[in-house]
Amino acid sequence: MTQVADYVLQRLSEWGVQRVYGYPGDGINGLLGAFDRADGEPEFIQARHEEMAAFMACAHAKFTGEVGCCVATSGPGAVHLLNGLYDAKLDHQPVVAVVGQQKRLSLGTHYQQEIALDQLFADVSEYCQMVVHPGQARHVIDRAFKTALTTRGVATIIIPNDVQEEDAMSSPPREHGSVFSSVGWSRPRVLPDHDELRKAADVLNAGDKVAMLVGQGAANAEAEVMEVAELLGAGVAKALLGREVLPDDLPYVTGPIGLLGSKASDKMMQGCDTLLMVGSSFPYSEWLPEEGQARGVEIDIDGRMIGIRYPMDAHLVGDSGETLRALIPLLQRKKDRGWREKIEKDVREWHDLADRWAGEHFGKTINPQAVAAELSARLPDDAILTADSGSGTNWWARHLKLREGMRASLSGTLATMGPGTPYAIAARFAYPDRPVIAFVGDGAFQMNGMNEMITVKRYLDRLSGPAPLVFCVFNNQDLNQVTWEQRAMAGDPKYPGSQDIPDVPYAAYAELLGLKGIVCTDPKKVGSAWDEALAVGRPVVLEFKVDAEIAPIPPHIMKEQGKKAGKAALHDPQLAGIATKGVRQKLTEYAEHLPGRGKK
Ligand SMILES: Cc1ncc(C[n+]2csc(CCOP(=O)(O)OP(=O)(O)O)c2C)c(N)n1
Ligand SMILES: [Mg+2]
């Protein structure tokens, strides 16, 4: 007779789950036995840490559009999942977590590893339920998937270990109280209100200078976004999670926005009279037009999220592709293309400026911007790019130019450290033939990336192949992003006690594990290091020793931050470096106005 655990895995399979990322423990002994019997359908993928398993599940959802699935034992294993699940919740990804619990008999006795899991998972989950009866498993699983898909969120299934080992009941008894659920869900077509659509068209037609901001919600509406941008003579800025919506080589794509953003996006937001936001909950309103400056139209599939970042004049609750298609016939093509031409000029200037920043040499250490710029020129077709949270995220956002068909993601809203490496691993499991490249800071690599290299070793045969798999580590021996935040936001100098981190030989460590390790310390060899890493044929840790003194400054330093950073610099242990490099990078920005460097 099959057990409830066997039935659970069978139902996950029926929901299309091929891989479950997890880590074992006796709270899920029943499930582990069932995984063994299931013979790969679904497959258990062993991470080093439950948080990594949850990141992998989240990345699976982001890169495939399917539900990601992770599993952990009761108590500590369940606690470890949380940060990865919050990443999914905040970035609106469907993830189902299955966690063990102590047996029913012991619950409520302060038993070993007994945690009130229903309470612990209540905030992160859109649906959280404990299976206390074998006949309940079917509908709890079904509702978990239906809820994760409908809400684009996390659903948690808690299964006490004794329940896992009970006889399965695929169909509950035909009696009062039983329910009979089915596997199945389909994405609804969500269309906006007709009058609101007309209102939106009026606003957009009346504007002379339209700025568009797209987020991940516009991911399946590339053609429509392009058509609307063309009609409206608009430029398009991309929130980080929306960076795969449009390639970066289009002349009117102003690129990233915000603290990690481009000067072209910033100029467009400052100069526009109309804002069209599509599928984005980009949080920082200081990078949007000032209230009253622009009229606004927003498209979002989630009515709870519409008109909460900038006061909008038309609120279109609907699917971005469908809504833009409905809008297009109502839009008049802007005859005056002056605004569009200005944006395209700003975009060209921005690309030149970013190239100049990346091309600057500061003595013997590598300019981290060059690491991204050199890769950008070499990006293989169909590459999938991931980033951790740190200063590298800035270079990833500003200096990597995505071409058509490339994918890119990171922890956009939780902005947690740690996902860069597990995202890349999950991407590779989902797409074994596609190149996958992760940008990871040394702090994040020490936090958990190094351990996940053991996962890469564990699955080396499957993760190797002609398509590159590269973990690019920015070795600056600093928690640099926060060091700069201390300087620019708090006005404090770098505090070495919290910011310095030890130098670790990451490439040598990779070699120890049987992976390829490449270390680059020479600014002149950044490009050739990439060439080598992209041609190896097995997973690579590519370590660059980079300069920690280059500020991940925004396109134009906000006055307040500039003042604070100046004050902080006076007492900073790295005063000399940050002062000269900061000033030089600022100068490059205005280089076209300097004698001897004609305006392009
Ligand atoms: C889990 C978590 N802890 C702390 C932070 C705050 N934080 C953001 S970036 C960062 C520094 C990252 O350092 P590193 O990985 O070395 O990258 P770097 O900025 O040096 O390039 C820290 C501590 C965070 N976002 N997430
Ligand atoms: Mg660092």
Image: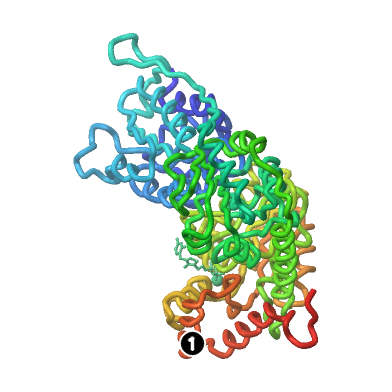
Judging depth in this view, the residue of 342 and 461 nearest the camera is 342
- Locate residue 528: give its quadrant: bottom right
Looking at the rendered structure, the number of numbered marks drawn on it comes to: 1
Quadrant for ligand 2 reads bottom right
- The reply to whether residue 303 is visible in this rendering is yes
Quadrant containing the N terminus is top left
Does residue 116 sit above or below 322 in this rendering? below
Quadrant containing the C terminus is bottom right
Which residue shows up at 55% across the image and 45% down it? Answer: 279
Judging depth in this view, the residue of 432 and 66 nearest the camera is 66
The residue sitting at the left extreme is 109
Which residue shows up at 36% across the image and 15% down it? Answer: 172
Give the residue type at disc 1: Asp
Q: Note whether ligand 1 is within 8 Å of mark 1.
A: no
- The reply to whether residue 416 is visible in this rendering is no
- Give how far across and how far down residue 62 sits, in percent: 57, 44
- Give how far across and how far down residue 250 sits, in percent: 75, 54
Does residue 382 sit above or below 175 in this rendering? below
Coloration of the structure image: rainbow
- Locate residue 227: give its quadrant: top right
The residue sitting at the top extreme is 174
**Circle 1: element type:** loop
- Give how far across and how far down residue 74 sits, in percent: 35, 42
User: Residue beneath label 1, please?
Assistant: 572
The residue carrying pointer 1 sits among few (fewer than 14), some (14 to 19) or many (20 or more) residues within 10 Å by Cα, namely: many
Judging depth in this view, the residue of 236 and 193 nearest the camera is 193
26 horizontally vs 197: left or right: left
139 horizontally vs 341: left or right: left
Which residue shows up at 27% across the image and 43% down it? Answer: 116
